[in-house]
Image: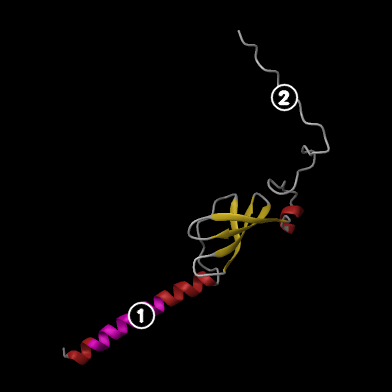
Amino acid sequence: MDGADIARITGSLLLIIVLILAAAWWLRRMGMLKTAEGPHIRVLSSCHVGARQQLLVVEVEGARLLLSANARQLALLHVLAPSPAAVAKNIPVAIGQPKVGAWSRSQSRPTSPPKPEQR
């Protein structure tokens, strides 16, 4: 093997590695590679807005949340209206909107249980 053969083999290996990385990036970008999600939490969409910052729309038990994520923190930006699928299935929304029959400020506060007697 001479220098030309070694250069050709090295170039071919580098090309294959670059193609694999590009395919993985493209599949992830198109949403074909799934990330780990819990049974009650789903990432509906994400958008990179900077080098290390992204916006996420996450569904948690029927409630949709707009989150900002970066290397140091995760922040809640807005609670969105429930998804049409959650409304159609009549899933109660845990965050953002009171459930029917839930306590509101216009109602009187529920009474607390009596305190135990001290001896």
Taking the image as shown, residue 19 lies to the left or right of residue 66, namely left
In the displayed structure, 4 sits above or below 26; it is below
Query: Is residue 9 covered in magenta?
Result: yes
Horizontal and vertical percent for residue 4? 21, 92
In the displayed structure, 95 sits above or below 36; it is above
The local crowd at label 1, few if under 14, some if 14 to 19, many if 20 or more residues have their Cα within 10 Å, is: few
Horizontal and vertical percent for residue 110? 76, 29
Identify the element where label 1 is drawn.
Answer: helix
Q: Mark 1 is on which residue type?
A: Ile
Q: Mark 2 is on which residue type?
A: Ser
The numbered dot on residue 68 is none
The local crowd at label 2, few if under 14, some if 14 to 19, many if 20 or more residues have their Cα within 10 Å, is: few
Q: Magenta residues?
A: 7-20
Q: Residue furthest left?
A: 1
Mark 2 lies on residue:
112
In the displayed structure, 118 sits above or below 61; it is above
How many badges with numbers are in the image? 2
Horizontal and vertical percent for residue 76? 62, 54
Which is nearer the N-term, disc 1 or disc 2?
A: 1
Mark whose residue sits in front, 1 or 2: 2
Taking the image as shown, residue 45 lies to the left or right of residue 70, namely right
Horizontal and vertical percent for residue 90? 75, 49
Query: Is residue 62 covered in magenta?
Result: no
Q: Which one is in front, 111 or 24?
A: 111
Mark 1 lies on residue:
16
**Which residue corresponds to the image point at 62% horizontal and 11% vertical from the top-left?**
118
**Which residue corresponds to the image point at 72% horizontal and 55% vertical from the top-left?**
82
Task: Check if mark 1's residue and mark 2's residue have beta carbons within 8 Å.
Answer: no
Identify the element where label 2 is drawn.
Answer: loop
Taking the image as shown, residue 59 lies to the left or right of residue 103, namely left
Q: Quadrant of residue 64?
A: bottom right
**Which residue corresponds to the image point at 68% horizontal and 45% vertical from the top-left?**
94
